[in-house]
Amino acid sequence: MGNRPTDEDAGDCVGELLDQALDLTARFLSDRADLSASAAFAMNRVGREGPIRLTTLAAKEGVSQPSMTQLIQRLERLGLVTRLADPDDGRAALIGITGLGQTLLDDRKRIRRERLTALLTTLTSDEECALWLSARVALPVLRRLVANADCSPDSDAAHPAGAGTVETRPVDQRKVLG
């Protein structure tokens, strides 16, 4: 590419984009009445990645194991997640999402999309087209960043040989954060 931005310029620009998107999502698009942000993030991860050990979930979400245990117990009481036998270790359990939990995540996603669709009507057609085109370009790159963020910084998976390329394999729609 011709004019490659400096790391600082790229970090500032992309950071501002993500800050604005997070603010829009948290303040205007999300329904915060039914789940806390931490509960929604944990459920999204379980829905995206499938059944997972509680210790792994806590580590990936950046919270203590006791805090995650309390959160999972609350979600279990609501019927949103369940404990499953770990096929690799009979002494351990995996946390899985229930049908009710998946329905809640799907409903939250639908509501966000409806609110966004309504908000998009406030843009000009050129602005809406520019945003749509930008999203088409940015989405595979953002998915790559999400995947890299889940890898340890020292692992080969975080810095594969083709790190300058964008992976564009199809992704299950449930993998979009709720």
Image: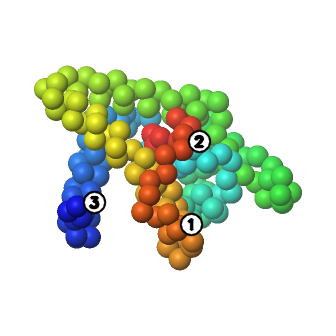
> Does residue 87 appear to the left or right of 36 in the view shown?
right
Query: In the rendered image, which residue does mark 3 sit on?
Result: 1
Distance between mark 3 and mark 2 Cα atoms:
37 Å
Of circles 1 and 3, the one toward us is: 3
Query: What is the x, y in percent for residue 41?
Result: 48, 48
Mark 3 element type: loop
Q: Residue at x 28, y 45 (%)?
A: 21
Per the rendering, the mark at residue 47 is: 2
**Mark 1 or mark 3, which has the lower sequence index?**
3
Distance between mark 1 and mark 3 Cα atoms:
24 Å
Q: Residue at x 28, y 34 (%)?
A: 132
* Amino acid bearing label 1: Ala
| Proximity of marks 1 and 2: CB atoms separated by less than 8 Å | no
Mark 1 element type: helix
Q: Quadrant of the N terminus?
A: bottom left
Residue 63 position (above or below residue 169): below
Dot 3 alpha-carbon crowd within 10 angstroms: few under 14, some 14 to 19, many 20 or more: few
